Amino acid sequence: MDKRVILDLDACIECKSCSAVCFYGHGAVLAQEFAGMAQATLPAICRHCDAAACVEACPTSALQKTDGRIVRSSMLCVGCKSCVFACPFGVIEPQLTRHHINKCDGCEDRVAEGKEPRCVVACPAGARKYAEPEEVYKEGLLLLSGRTAGEHPIKRR
Amino acid sequence: MSSDIKRTRCIYCSLCCEVTYEREDDKAIPSQEEGRFCARACVVADLSDHPLRSYVAELRRKVKLEPTELDEVVGWLKKELEGAEENAAVLLDGNTTNENLSAGVRFAREVIGTENLAIYLPSSDEALLDGICTTQASLSEPEGLRDCDVILAIGDPFSSHPVVSEPVLKAKSRTRGNELITIDSINGRTAKFATRPILVKPGQEAEAVASILKAVDAGSIPDELPVEVDLGEVAERIKSCSKLGIVVSCPEGRTMAVDALGACIAKLAELTSAVFVPLFTYGNAVGAYSAKSALGVESFAALITAEKFRSAGKLVCIGLNLRVLGVLDTRPIVWAGSIRPPRDGRIIASVPLAMWFEESGTFTKSNGGSVELSPVIEPPKGAIELRELLACFGATADQTKLELARRTERYPSVIGTLSGEKKLSLSGGEVVCVPLYDATCLYDASLSSLFSWSREIQSEPVIYLSEEDSASAGVPRGGRVRLSGVNGHVVLLAEVSPDIPNGVAGVTPSFRSTEKLFTPRVDSETGKMIVSPCVVKVQKETESG
C-alpha cells in the first residue's frame, strides 16, 4: 500500500503549524483546514482515497490518481465544484477565483525527491507520520479511516 | 543541504528553534529540510516584503513624514543629539541580538551621553525573570524533560510554545504512571493531555504554586501568607517522583502576580532539582534581561516613571512595538524599526532597519548558552542593520559577558506581594477575559493580523464563552457580543466552548480590537508595567449597536 500522511491523535496539539507550512510552501494557498470534533480540533486534509469520489465526480478528468496521490490539473479544472460536493470528508476548498480549488497534493515535489511532505516534517509535536498503514498497526496504534491513529483516539488523557 | 538553504534561529519565543529557510525571489521561505517548527517561524515568508515594511528613511519637515536619504536623517540626528545628554532618552527593544543591545547602550551613554536608557521586555517576561532571579534555580532546555516522570505545567505551553509539546508528551507516555499536571485558568491544549488538569481562577496560578511549594517545604512560604488553594495531593506526587519537570508559560495578560509566580515556581525547581523550563515571549528574553543587569540599564517601566525621563525632551525608540508607544507621552520620537511607524504626530524621523533573518548576531538561551543568528537574505535596499546604523554614530558592541544576576535577598519581598495582590471579583454579567496566545499570532497586532495565512484562518477576532455565560447573555454561537470594561468597549464574534469555565472568557489577541482589552499600564508606585486579565461585562450586541 502507498505511504500516506497519518495523524497521531495521541500527539496532535492543534497548533496549526501544518496549515502554516502547507500554506507558505504552496505559494500562499490554503489546502489544510481544521474540523471541530467532539473534544478536539483536527486537521482535515485530503486522504488520497483509493476509490475517490472526487475523481468520479469530476466532469473534465481534472482530478486523477497518480502514484498513490490525487492531483489536480489546473488547466483542465473548470471550477464547477463537483469535487467539493462529492468529497465525503469536506477537504476540498472552493475558491472565489474560477477554475481554482485548493486541495492537498501530497507534496509531490518533495516526495519525488525522497523527502516527506512539509506538514510531516514541520509538526512540532511529532504527530504526523508519512507511512504505510501496516507500519502504524505495528506500533500498536488504532487506525481510523486510514488517516488518523491513536492509542485511544479522541480520549487524550 | 543545498547552497540556497540557510540555517538561523527563530526569535519568536525563547526556545529559539533552529530553522531552515530557502531564498526564493528575495524572500525567505520555510524549507522544512530539518527540524520542526511552529506557525510563527513560517510567517517570515510574509515579512520580507510585508506591506508595513519600512524601506525608506523619513523626516517630518512640515506636516507629514517625507522620504529622504538615510545620510540626511543621520546628519540631522547627530546635530539634534549634540548637547542633548540631559534632554534625550533611548528606549531599546530587547528582542534583538546581544551585539545590538550592547551597541545601543553605548550609543546612549557614549554618543549622546545620557543615562536615560531602558531595554524593553514584555512585562510578563520581565516579571517572570525578576521572580526566577530571587532563587538559584537552574534553567534547562526542553530536551531535558524527556526523562521526567512527572511534569508540572503552568499555563498553556502547548499553545504558546508548541515545540515543547514533543518532549513533554514523550515523557508522559514513556512509562505507565508518568504524569502531566497542569495549572491553568482554562482547559487549554496542554490541559487536554494532562493526567491531572487543575483549573484555577485567572490570577490564582501563583497561589496554586505557592500551595504546592508550602507542602514541599513549609519554610519557603511565610505562615502569614494566606494560601486558599489546597494542592496537597499534587505536592505528595511531586515529592514521590524520581525526576520532576517544570514548564511555565504566562504570556502578558494571562495571569497576575507573575513575579511571585516566577519566584515560587523557581524555588520549587531549586528545592526538587527539577528540570526547569521557563518559556518567554521574546527570543532573547534572557539576553536582554541579563544585559539590563550587567550593563546597569533601567527597566522600561522604571524609566518612564522616573523624573529624569520626564524631563528628557526627545525619545529615540529602537525597535519598540506599537502597543508600547501607547504608554509613552507626547514628546517627539525618532523611530528606528523594521516596520513603518504608525501615523503618529509624535514621530519626527524614521530609519528603516533590517529584520532578524537579514542580520547576524547572538542570542542568550535560557540555560545561559548562546545561539547564532545568520542572515538568510540581504536586507532590502534602504534598510540597514542596527549595528551599522549605530556605527555611523561611532557606537559599536563591546564584549561584556551577559549572565543572569541572582538576587536571593529579594525572595521574601517578592513572595510577600502575593498577599497584596487584589483578587478579581465579578458582578452579574461579568467575566474575566484572558488572551489565548498561540503560535498563530505574534506579540504585535500590527503584524499578526496582516499575515496572509493569519487572514485565511482567522480573519476576525473571537471571544470564547462558556455555555452558561453565553446563555445568560442571550448570545447564540456565532452571535456578536459587546464587551465593556475599563479600557473601553469592543464588539466581537462569540463562540461557545466547553473548554472555558464559567466566569472566564478567552479572546484571540493580536487584533487591534482585542489588544485594547489588554492595554499595558504602568503602576506609578512600583514602576512595574502591568498587563493583566481584565473584567468585562458581556452583553448581546443589538443590531442598532
Image: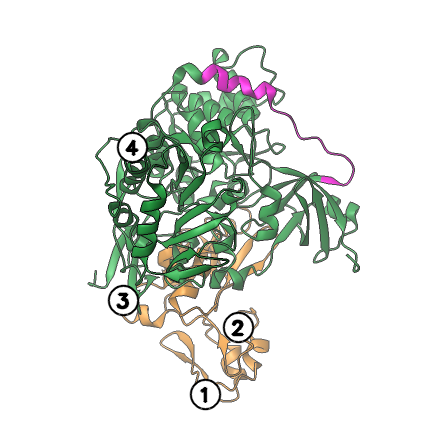
Q: Amino acid at mark 2?
A: Ile
Q: CA distance from mark 2 to mark 4?
A: 47 Å
Residue drawn at 42 percent across, 51 percent down: A140
**Badges 2 and 1, same chain:** yes
Chain of the residue on which disc 1 is drawn: A
- Identified at 51% across, 14% down, the residue is B221
x%, y% of residue B94? Answer: 38, 40
Residue at horizontal 26 percent and vertical 54 percent from the top:
B375
Relative to B532, B413 lies left or right: left
Q: Is residue B13 visible?
A: yes
Label 2 marks which chain's residue? A
Tell me the residue that label 2 is attached to: A92
User: Mark 2 or 4, which is nearer the eye?
Assistant: 4
The reply to whether residue B281 is in sight is: no
Q: CA distance from mark 4 to mark 3?
A: 38 Å
In the rendered structure, find residue A76 and report the number of the disc placed on it.
1
**Which one is in front in this view, the residue at disc 3 or the one at disc 1?**
1
- The amino acid type, in three-letter code, at marker 1 is Leu
SS state under label 3: loop
Same chain for the residues under marks 3 and 2 in the image: yes
Amino acid under label 4? Gly
Q: Quadrant of the N terminus of chain B?
A: bottom left
Q: Quadrant of the C terminus of chain B?
A: bottom right
Q: Residues within 10 Å of mark 4 (few under 14, many from 20)?
A: some
- Palette colour of chain B: green
Q: Check if mark 4's residue and mark 1's residue have beta carbons within 8 Å.
A: no
Q: Earlier in the sequence, mark 3 or mark 1?
A: 1
For chain A, the rendered hue is orange
Compared to residue B453, the image places residue B194 above or below, namely above
Q: Position of residue B132 (x, y in %)?
A: 42, 26
For the residues tagged 4 and 1, is the chain the same?
Answer: no
Can residue B413 be found in the magenta stretch?
yes
